[in-house]
Amino acid sequence: MVLNITSTLSIFLLIALSTAIFFAARRLKVPYTVLLTLVGLLLVPITSIPWLHDSIGFLGNMVLTPELLFFIFLPVLIFESGFNMKIRNMLDNVWSIGLLSVVGLLVSTLVIAGLLTLTLPLIGFDIPFILALLFGAVISATDPAAALTLFKEAKAPKRLSMIFEGESLFNDGTAVALFLVVLAVATDGFHGGSTIFHGVLDFGIMVLAGIAFGLVMAALFSRAIRFTRQNEFATVTLITISAHLVFILTELINESGVMHISSIIATAVSSLFLGNYSRHIMTPKTNEYLHSLIEHMSFVANSLVFLLAGLLFANSGVDFGQLWLPILVTVAVVMIARVVAVYSITLPLNLTKLEAHIPASWQALLAWGSLRGALAIIFVLMIPDDFTLEGWTYAYSPRDFLLALTIGCILATLFIKAPLIGPFIRKFKLNEPAPLEEAHEADLGVYYVMTERS
């Protein structure tokens, strides 16, 4: 997106529009992110109306580019999740979070690839396995932004939200590493065992190097904060730019060709470290201000992502009339793959008792609440326009085909899955406070009364 007076005005108008949508969503009792995407979809036909086109037609021309998503919005969303996540609570659920974000992602990718390769030829769409595998890598990462908002509004158990948020935070990084490896294989070809070996090696290096680089950068920022703690504006500025600096520096290292580091994992680890081990350096006033600022930044970034996603979908040029059947099949396949991924992790975990038991209702909600969003869009837009495969004879390119499937899956999760998360939580009575939480609140109440009387 070229920054000019029209695009700048568009951004601020979309932010103002998102504020109105927020209040409308509250009044209509529909998920905020769903209403954002719906409005984004409708903006294109609305701005095409003759008597409106001359005044607000420029809104329909807003373009959601991979660079805008990857370098501007994504670091903000990662930072908000990582900075506010408690490491102690995460470590209590490290097995479920770790296995879901790595093994679950791989299982989902392979199941999607296998089922699509088997089912799509039955309806006349014979696609190569490597393209199905690439799509599996594109769509398997869960998006925390939409689902976690719904979890909080429906008062889902904190541990369940922690597992889902932890998985979403870290499988973004593993998904990028997996996607880049599969894309390299799809571009350069498969050469037997050496391709598998180098793919696994690249995947491991990206993940481990991301963790190491994130820790180093967090230590540097933490050191810098000690020098600025007397000035809250300088401290807050350092913290808020940390995510983008870590992300962009990582990408610069990647472009240099020295090695490939997962920028998402580096940013997540850095944010997690700063949020847990650097807050004590800051004054209470700075902490309070920083918390509000981060929430506001996340709200703006989320709002623009989903509004622009709706605009992107409406302007994509995808012929849904021709591809509606493979899209429906793919939506079903992705849902099945998520169920397989969740239960293949949670059932053995419950049997081995490596961590606290995950109830059946939680497992069902983890399987259902896997919404897709910004990252999947980034992946598809990162595929080169001239990407093709041997033997591909369809009128549309492999990239356009994947874009159609991705849009279909994102819309299905937003318009079908998202609205049902709240009712599912209430049906399973997960919004009712646990006895321990009730006892804790009662103790706090008694303590408050006693201190007031004294």
Image (cartoon, rainbow, N blue to C red):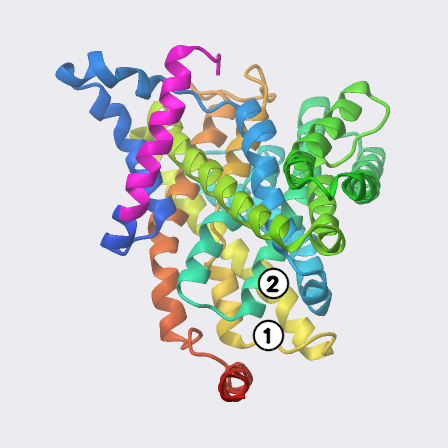
Asked whether the viewer can see residue 141, the reply is no
Give the dominant element type of the magenta stretch: helix, strand or loop: helix
Magenta span: 1-23
- Name the one closer to the observer, 216 or 64: 216
Q: Quadrant of residue 38?
A: top left
Determine the secondary structure under disc 2.
helix
Residue 62 on image: x %, y %: 39, 20
Asked whether the viewer can see residue 292, the reply is yes
Residue at mark 2: 163
Determine the secondary structure under disc 1.
loop
Residue at mark 1: 358
- Name the one closer to the observer, 272 or 145: 272
Q: Amino acid at mark 2?
A: Ile
Magenta region includes residue 14: yes
How far apart are the two marked residues, 1 and 2, measured between alpha carbons?
10 Å
First in sequence, mark 1 or 2: give its number.
2
Evaluate if marks 1 and 2 touch, with contact meaning CB atoms under 8 Å apart. Answer: yes
The nearer-to-camera label among 1 and 2 is 2
* Residue at (39, 39) in percent of width and height: 408
* Residue at (46, 24) in percent of width and height: 64
Residue 54 on image: x %, y %: 21, 11
